[in-house]
Amino acid sequence: MRMGNVIAAGSVAALLLAGHAFALKSDKDQRSTVEADYSKFVQSKTGAVGDPDVYDLDGNVVITRGSIKMTSAHATLYKIPSAANSPNAGETSRVVLTGKQAHMQQVHDGDCALMTANADKIDYNPLTSLADLTGSVVVIQQGRGEFRGEHMIYNTDTGDMESGNKAEPSGRVHLVMEAKAQAPAQSPNNCGFPGGAGKPAAAKPLDKPAEAKPQPKQAKPAVKPAADKNDGGAH
């Protein structure tokens, strides 16, 4: 069934606006950069996984990771200590953005469509790729639709979104789905962002050397018999 400008309001357990709109795969392979007007660092006292290093950031906070960009008035970053007994030692385990409103955006793989999200609070776990958005949430997927509600979980790895609660009818959502459009063109350059670690190119088989052709046998020159020393002499 083809739907255009359809408005749906109701409690749902799961919601997928994307429709094959996967998030940019290379984002998870990129390093994060952080900017802010002010920062405060509190180091882990024990170096254990449950006692993270904490960074408090204030004023024009900007965090980027590939095509993912997050902005807010305040942010708190939690990082697993480098000495922790964990395969994720040294990695950021949680980013909490607050302020009216925190903002998050990401590019979709292939067609480079932009997803934007605004909420009063964004709680993002880079290890699980899940972002928990709460408070006046507005999510817009370019060319696909718009979502409004009080709570949403967004997967920055797959682009999947989940919202609503069947057990709480008051947690209603509002969804607008765009009319079916022509399939957008696919990007040949990873939407202009750095790519992930690619597979090494397969080795090209070496060309076989040309087989030597047999040379034709050359005829041996005729040998003239030696002249008799007595030829032409008197007998």
Image: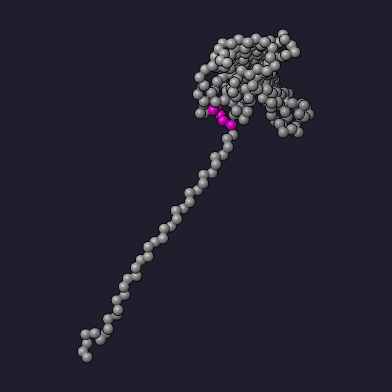
Residue sticking out furthest to the right = 46
- Quadrant where the C terminus sits is bottom left
Tally of numbered discs: 0
Quarter assignment of residue 126: top right
Q: Is residue 133 visible?
A: no
Q: What's the residue at 21%, 89% (across, down)?
A: 234
Quarter assignment of residue 214: bottom left
Q: Nearer the viewer, residue 2 or 71?
A: 2
Residue sticking out furthest to the bottom = 235
Q: What's the residue at 59%, 18% (across, down)?
A: 115
In this rendering, position of residue 233 left or right of residue 88: left
Q: Nearer the viewer, residue 146 or 61?
A: 146
Q: What's the residue at 72%, 14% (across, down)?
A: 165
Residue sticking out furthest to the front = 1
- Quadrant where the N terminus sits is top right
Q: How is the image coloured?
A: one colour
Q: Nearer the viewer, residue 10 or 113?
A: 10
Residues drawn in magenta: 190-196
102 versus 224 height, above or below: above
Q: Is residue 22 visible?
A: yes
Residue 211 is situated, as x and y percent measured from the top left of the image, at: 45, 55
Residue 98 is situated, as x and y percent measured from the top left of the image, at: 68, 15
Residue sticking out furthest to the top = 170
131 drawn magenta: no
Residue 193 is situated, as x and y percent measured from the top left of the image, at: 55, 27
Quarter assignment of residue 136: top right
In this rendering, position of residue 89 left or right of residue 199: right
Q: What's the residue at 77%, 29% (across, down)?
A: 48
Q: Nearer the viewer, residue 48 or 5?
A: 5
Residue 26 is situated, as x and y percent measured from the top left of the image, at: 59, 29
